[in-house]
Image (tube, grey):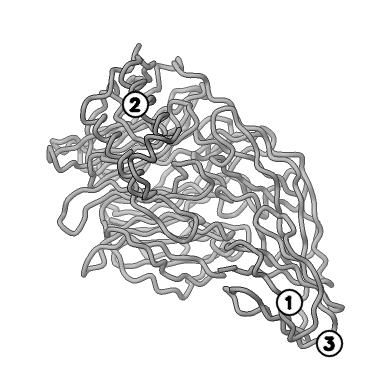
Amino acid sequence: MERSLPNPGHMISMWMHLLSSWMKERKTLKKYMESKKIAILIIGLFVVMAIDLAAQPFEPITSSFTGLGRSYVAWGDFDNDGDLDVAVCGITTAGDHLTQIYMNGEGAFIDIQAGIKGVKDGSLEWGDYDNDGDLDLLLTGETSDAGNISLIYRNDDGIFTEYDAGFPGIGYGHTAWGDYDNDGDLDVLITGNWTVSLYENIDGSFNLVEQDFGHLQNSRAAWGDFDNDGDLDLLLIGDTGGGYLTAVYLNEDGEFITANLDMEGLFSGSVDWIDFDKDGDLDICVSGYDIFLEPRLLLYENLADGNIAPYLVYLPGLGISSVDWGDYDNDGDMDILACGKNASCGGGITNVYYNQEGIFLSEPQANLAGAIRCSAAWADYDNDGDLDFLLTGLTPEEVPFSQFYRNAAGDNNYTMNTMPVAPDNLESIVGGSHVILSWDKATDEQTPQDGLNYNLRIGTHSGDCDVLSPMANAETGFRYIQAIGNTNTEVSRMIMNLPEGTYYWSVQSIDQAYSGSPFAAEQSFTILETDIYELSESTTIRVYPNPAGEKVFIRSSSSETIEFRMYNLNGQEVLYGSVTSGETIDISSLHKGAYFMHLRDGKGTSIQRLIKQ
């Protein structure tokens, strides 16, 4: 089967994108015409116009899924058997509120009758909050008889037990797992019903964090390390009651500061962190309604200097929508799966947009059912090396439905995706109760090296993950969820406040189709409580200012000489020496970004993070 030629609108989109690139780089047309870049792009356009490309159609598959609108879909291998199961929630044709978990039995999906409260207008998120190696489920939404809820269902060998962690019940909102404090367990962000609340996971119990994110309704949230400083930042959209918001909150040692970014406020849509341009930092995708109640689908490119730039995509805007990213055609870059209400027709649309070197074009032969108040999510359910997807939502006539689509009917017309190579050169640097773990970038046949992301596991025994769960099989590397890894695109991670003991760790690489490599050869490190500097009340080391410019001061209550070593986020030593209290360290030669400082005197050691401006 062949992919049809792009229509004129798509070609205009490509030329407009090219023109915006010229303007962005502020070069003249004459200079561009003399450059190799423009020659290659022009040739590429004619190639796209002239060559028949292999198509990647999606075949609708008959399944046992209940039709659901006002819905949410979340894939996850809850039974750890090596294939992806799925959780869904929403409202049925009969008006029932429903939440179901379907077990994948060699491609046939069976409702396990999990006994989970039924909701509509909610969210479902898989996460291993208790680090026991299997996926638990976080559920929010509106029930038919008990109002709004926010509950955890703990997975114990496939039996789901309700756990009320004290979260506020929400509908028309969202929830997101994320280890914002780098202590190895998943914390929770809840947004909706005019609240945004962050809860810290402390040994499986959740404590409210004092942080003011404002009040939001019809909101969405996602965690991602926007500034590549080693901790998770927060992306939010929603209705503030007096306007609409799209904002990034930068995580500065557990305190969140609003980033000074120019983004259009949206609500009733979706949010995603993705590295669509494969340059090693996370870009932003948001959809929803703007201040004029016009549906939008927007991309912002991360410029890696704390700023963003709108990225012109010329795709239909979508409200009450769902957007998911994944490399369905196995060419090494992220494509778009999107559904929602469109302005031009006023009804629901669903489409796949393939990424042609940063230009997004509609898959012309997809022929997908249109949907609103919907959810769509990629997953390679049959483990054949390409991404399939499940779509749920309301038809334009507002009838709930669920439709499963298989990629190329199981026969991949493109090169089959292969798993990436495992990272190597794993290293650990211990300082007191903290450790810096680092590794080299991996490689992959399809995804460029800078487009890979990474996933870490840590346990107190060999092969375990009771300190930091990768939500993946430790032996095979199979991913239990379809998502980027827990260190995002970074090749280092600092874990803080570890008790005394020996720890075992490894890391895997993940490509843009969410295929995980085997884990690298396991390494270990030891935390010695007698070396924990932070427990000493008689001595402290202070590094300031932070963030810093040309130099930093080192202040200590001890008269001991302080040895220091600085590491970048790749784990490479960039500066070392020794000072006494009150002296300065010249950091003018360092590039802007985040660094780890390993400090030692006669009484102990400490690791601190420093931001170079």
Q: Which is nearer the eye, 1 or 149?
A: 1
Task: Indicate which disc residue 559 carries.
Answer: 3
From this view, report whether residue 411 is shown above or below residue 110: above
Give amino acid for label 3.
Answer: Ser
Nearer to me, 561 or 97: 561
Q: How crowded is mark 3: few (under 14 residues within 10 Å), some or many (20 or more)?
A: few
Looking at this view, name the residue that lies furthest to the top. Answer: 1
Residue under the image location 40 percent in, 37 percent down: 358
**What residue is disc 1 on?**
534
Q: Taking 419 as reference, is 193 left or right?
A: left
Whether residue 119 is visible here, answered yes or no, is no
Is disc 2 in contact with disc 3, using a CB cutoff of under 8 Å?
no
In-front residue for pair 543/18? 18
Residue 611 pos. (x, y %): 59, 68
- The Cα atoms of the two marked residues, 2 and 3, are separated by 67 Å
Q: Which residue lies furthest to the right in this view?
A: 602
Q: What's the amino acid at mark 1?
A: Glu
Q: Earlier in the sequence, mark 3 or mark 1?
A: 1
Whole-percent x and y of residue 129?
56, 54
Asked if one can make out residue 167 in the rendered structure from this viewpoint, the answer is yes
218 or 288, which is in the foreground? 288
Residue 202, given in percent of the width and then of the height, sits at 59, 66
State the separation of the CA atoms marked 2 and 1: 59 Å
Specify which label sits upstream in the sequence, 2 or 1.
2
Q: Residue at x 29, y 53 (%)?
A: 143
Residue 45 is labelled as 2
| Labels 2, 3: front one | 2
Quadrant of the image occupied by residue 277: top left
The quarter of the rendered structure image containing the C terminus is bottom right
| In the rendered image, the vertical position of residue 594 relative to residue 513, given as above or below | below
